[in-house]
Image: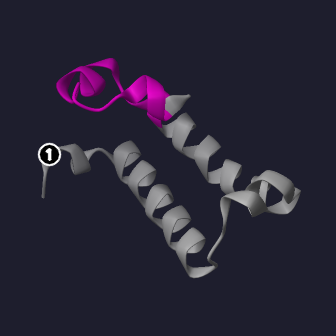
């Protein structure tokens, strides 16, 4: 297992991202639907918010050790 996956917070980030991606693909969500349908917006933004929270909780040392990841972009 790659070292980056050893963090519990990172594992949660990864799991949320995979689940969200799978849902979008399975339900064939389109950009236009996301722009106009509030329930879909909530469905997508909630996991993204959770990912941001997990990124916020990663230690500074962890983020520095994996500086190839744009943590500020992920958190925003």
Q: Position of residue 33 (x, y in %)?
A: 77, 63
Q: Quadrant of residue 26?
A: bottom right
Examine the residues drawn in magenta and state their main secondary structure. helix
The answer to whether residue 33 is seen in the rendering is yes
Up the image or down, 43 lies above or below 53; here it is below
Q: Residue at x 49, y 28 (%)?
A: 56
Q: What kind of element bears circle 1? A: helix
Quarter that holds the N terminus: bottom left
Q: Residue at x 21, y 30 (%)?
A: 66
Magenta span includes 2: no
Q: Position of residue 55 (x, y in %)?
A: 45, 34
Q: Residue at x 50, y 65 (%)?
A: 21
Q: Position of residue 68 (x, y in %)?
A: 22, 30
Left or right side of 5 for 13: right
Quarter that holds the C terminus: top right
Q: Nearer the viewer, residue 52 or 25?
A: 25
- What range is drawn magenta here? 55-74
Q: Quadrant of residue 42?
A: bottom right
Please rate how many residues cluster around mark 1, counting C-alpha atoms within 10 Å: few if below 14, some from 14 to 19, many from 20.
few
Q: Residue at x 64, y 79 (%)?
A: 27
Q: Nearer the viewer, residue 35 or 20?
A: 35
Q: Nearer the viewer, residue 32 or 53?
A: 32
Q: How is the image coloured?
A: one colour
Q: Position of residue 65 (x, y in %)?
A: 18, 25
Give the residue furthest to the bottom.
Answer: 26
Give the residue furthest to the front.
Answer: 32
Left or right side of 54 for 47: right
Left or right side of 52 for 6: left
Up the image or down, 71 lies above or below 34; here it is above
What residue is disc 1 on?
3
The answer to whether residue 43 is seen in the rendering is no
């Amino acid at each position: 297992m790659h070292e980056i996956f050893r963090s519990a917070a990172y594992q949660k980030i990864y799991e949320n991202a995979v689940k969200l991606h799978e849902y979008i693909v399975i339900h064939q969500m389109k950009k236009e639907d996301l722009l106009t349908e509030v329930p879909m917006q909530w469905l997508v933004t909630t996991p993204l918010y959770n990912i941001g929270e997990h990124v916020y909780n990663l230690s500074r040392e962890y983020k520095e050790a994996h500086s190839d990841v744009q943590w500020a972009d992920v958190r925003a």
